[in-house]
Image (cartoon, rainbow, N blue to C red):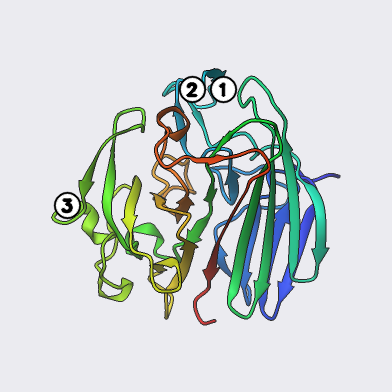
Amino acid sequence: MIPPSGTQYRLEHGGQRAVVTEVGATLRTYEVRGSEVCWGFGEDEMCGGGRGQVLAPWPNRLRDGRYEFEGTPAQVPLDEPERGNAIHGLVRWAPWGLVEHERSAVRLEHVLHPQPAYPFRLRIEIEYRLDDGGLTVSVRAVAEGDRRTPFGLGFHGYLAAGAGGVDAARLAVPAERRLVLDERMIPVGVEDVRGTAYEVVAGSLPCAAREPIGALRLDDCFTGIAVGGDGRWHAELLASDAPAPVELWADHAFGYAMVYSGDTLAEPDRRRAVALEPMTCPPDALRTGDDLVVLEPGEAFAASWGIVPSGL
């Protein structure tokens, strides 16, 4: 029987194991020596909660599913109808073609052809690779049409929070600001995290020096993220039963990080893991243009992010 997520591409390196799927180029599982690093889903399951999905050609939400780019209007089906939004792009349920698969890496690609929701041609290629430093995810997007092409990107991975769940875990995202969202989860402003409840997860303090997340509900987008001398920002999650934190890093192209504590998921999945989502632009960027990547015909965009598991 064909799994709901299509062909399964298995990766191995040392004690690390990962599975990437044909549907959505999704990171279905990632573990080290049998311990879960990313909260995933079974081979016989359909992805739920966005676990491990690729979000393109925009991440997060698009109000009314409607936007206009250089005089051309577009309308996207509303797949978050209760809020009147289109959410998480167009590729997460699409089949991706295999470019190359080896023991520790896989490269997949998908071509978005012009359509009412996105009247541009864009080729996206993603590589997942395991090595001694953990998991690295590299993406390259090329505008293959004859016009300028707007583009945004995100990844919806969850870091496992351990036996104590989200409440007992500690999180450190090196961000100075949080987007203020309305009831439709669309940005309406920005605030400094200092002096707010969100200071427990954002700011410059290292993970080990923070208090646990506790009952704080998170479905928030952070920005003003500090990039180090290596051109990357580094966030950490320390589970209550882990000796050291898991690190998620992303290069400077990812200027936003969405953090979701899973409060709207059904039991037993609620507050089981923390979604830490690197994004190149904020919610609603196709409509507002905020930090939207615009590619000239033939131009390419490249970026990378990764995970360094505890103990590597």
| Left or right relative to 25: residue 158 | left
Residue 215 in view in this figure: no
Residue at (53% x, 22% y) in the render: 78
Residue 195 in view in this figure: yes
Point out which mark residue 40 bears. Answer: none
Q: Residues within 10 Å of mark 1 (few under 14, many from 20)?
A: many
Q: At which x and y percent is residue 15?
A: 66, 79
| Left or right relative to 215: residue 69 | right
Q: Secondary structure at mark 2?
A: strand
Q: Hey, what amino acid is under mark 1?
A: Val
Quick one: label 1 or label 3, which is nearer the N terminus? 1
Residue identifier under label 3: 196
Q: Secondary structure at mark 1?
A: loop
Quick one: label 2 or label 1, which is nearer the N terminus? 2
Residue identifier under label 1: 76
Q: Are marks 2 and 1 in contact (CB under 8 Å)?
A: yes
The Cα atoms of the two marked residues, 2 and 3, are separated by 33 Å
Residue at (41% x, 39% y) in the render: 264
Q: Residue extending furthest left?
A: 195
Quick one: label 2 or label 3, which is nearer the N terminus? 2
Q: Hey, what amino acid is under mark 3?
A: Thr
The C terminus, quarter of image: bottom right
| Left or right relative to 172: residue 268 | right
Q: At which x and y percent is residue 61?
A: 45, 33
| Left or right relative to 111: residue 258 | left
Q: Is residue 206 above or below residue 5?
A: below
Q: Hey, what amino acid is under mark 2?
A: Tyr
Residue identifier under label 2: 67
Q: Within the image, what quadrant is residue 16 found in?
A: bottom right
Q: Is residue 123 above or below residue 224?
A: above
Q: Secondary structure at mark 3?
A: loop
